[in-house]
Image: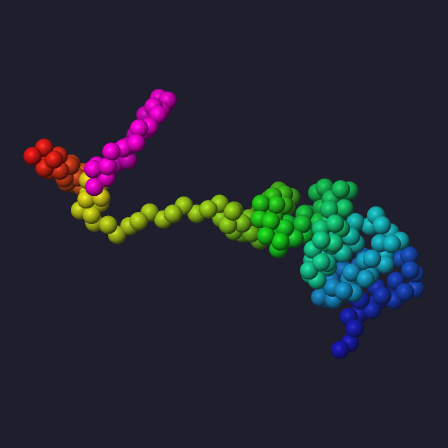
Amino acid sequence: MSENPRIEELRRRVQTDAASIAFAQLAEEYRRAGRYEEAVAACRTGLAIHPGYLSARVTLGRALIEINELEGAAAELAQVLRSAPENLSAIRGLAEIHHRLGNLDQALAFYQAALNLARHDPDLEQTIGELARAITPARPPIADGLSFEQASAEFLSALDTEPAPVAPLAPSAPVAPEPVALPQLERFLDAIHTYRQRRAV
């Protein structure tokens, strides 16, 4: 298989001039081509000469993520953020690292920071939504399928149990009750009335 012409050109430039900053472009082309080990090697060689080249350090961090060297990747991306706190690629990279490690709270914080910089990004919005649901326990579903008679029976059964004393609550603003279907309310009140009559006998 023939070499990518862009990679071949950049590699020739770097070989001709070891101090060339073209190493950063070469590394990124390697990363995009899925040649992560070569991307890492190109970055490390170039960064030894140009340690302040942040875009190359981002490429290094992202390539390290792909080969699952997460600790090294986090160190590289954190170094980028110390110099450029709003570097979106570094923030997203750290979010992905925490996500892979199962640190969902930290991952969510980084993803939200990324969304603040890339507003309305649909991928970020979806990931944040999924993480938020994973972190917040779902409320148990309300049991359904009970007939009115079954619900009334459960309520009446609960009346047989003496309630535990509770501390008085501070007065609060009255809350309007939700509307209840009148026929069901009447049947419910009739059931309570019948129950109390039985208890009185």
Query: In which image quadrant can residue 11 be found?
Result: bottom right
Q: Which residues are magenta?
A: 157-181
- Residue 187 coordinates in the image, percent (x, y): 14, 40
Q: Tell me, what colour scheme is on the image?
A: rainbow
Which residue is outermost to the top?
171
Query: In which image quadrant can residue 12 be found?
Result: bottom right
Left or right of residue 122: residue 175: left
Q: Is residue 89 visible?
A: no
Left or right of residue 178: residue 123: right
For the residue pair 97 and 127, the one nearer the viewer reads as 97
- Residue 146 coordinates in the image, percent (x, y): 24, 50
Any magenta on residue 169?
yes
Which residue is outermost to the left?
201
Name which residue lies at 61% across and 45% down.
106
- Residue 98 coordinates in the image, percent (x, y): 63, 50
For the residue pair 86 and 42, the one nearer the viewer reads as 42
Q: How many marks?
A: 0
Which quarter of the figure is the N terminus placed in? bottom right
Name which residue lies at 24% across and 37% down.
161
- Residue 16 coordinates in the image, percent (x, y): 92, 64
